[in-house]
Amino acid sequence: MTFDYYELDDGTLEIEGYDNEDKAKIVEIPDTIDEKKVSVLNRYLFSNEVVEEIILPESLKIIEDQAFYGATALRKLEINGIETMGDYCIYECPKIKEVRLPEGLKELGERSIENCESLTDIYLPSTLETIDEYNFDLCADGLKIHVPAGSNTETLVRKVIENLEYNVEVVPE
């Protein structure tokens, strides 16, 4: 599989596309391409009906808006290293059941995780500073959001879920 990318001002790379002529079900983004770190995923990168599993590298810092928007076949998403997740990132992904976000993540954008009807478990890190108020809506009834006990993340999540109209449980760990 080959990736389309361009170099950013800091010398890292932004992935803006990939060749999936073989209709691969598993995509792994490498940590480096041509000896340069991959730091950003572009918008709509995985908005398709083919890919079932995506593995992201430690070098990744930003997932731009709508990177997985409408990824209808997506079942597993391994996210490593990110600091910012843009708006509508994991949105309308009907088959995904679990999302684990890494330590170091600071921001969940507007509706970053929403409208994923099979999503039953979300694991959030202690490092979150901002969670948009419209996250976690229209996911599976009985959604469990796992958070570090007593953390700022727990406080932020409890505030966000106050307005949800279905059963959501915050699970301090």
Image (cartoon, rainbow, N blue to C red):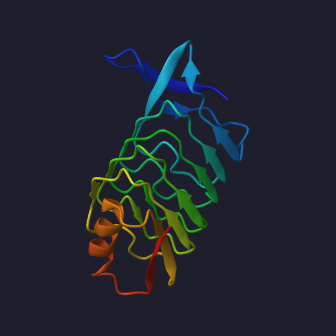
Give the answer, above or below, for where 41 lies relative to 14.
below
Location of residue 57 (image quadrant): top right
Which residue occupies 50% across, 50% down? 47
Which residue occupies 44% across, 54% down? 125
Side of 124 relative to 100 (left or right) = left
Residue 41 position within the rendered picture, expressed as x and y whole percent measured from the top left:
44, 36
Side of 108 relative to 52 (left or right) = left
Residue 4 position within the rendered picture, expressed as x and y whole percent measured from the top left:
52, 25
Give the answer, above or below, for where 157 lies relative to 23.
below
Q: Give the tally of numbered discs.
A: 0
Location of residue 88 (image quadrant): bottom left
Give the answer, above or below, for where 104 lies relative to 110.
above
Q: Nearer the viewer, residue 168 or 148?
A: 148
Residue 109 position within the rendered picture, expressed as x and y whole percent measured from the top left:
30, 54
Asked if residue 51 shows in the view, the reply is no
Residue 97 position within the rendered picture, expressed as x and y whole percent measured from the top left:
60, 67
Side of 44 relative to 74 (left or right) = left
Quarter of the image for the N terminus: give it.
Answer: top right
Furthest toward the front, the residue is 150
Asked if residue 58 shows in the view, the reply is yes
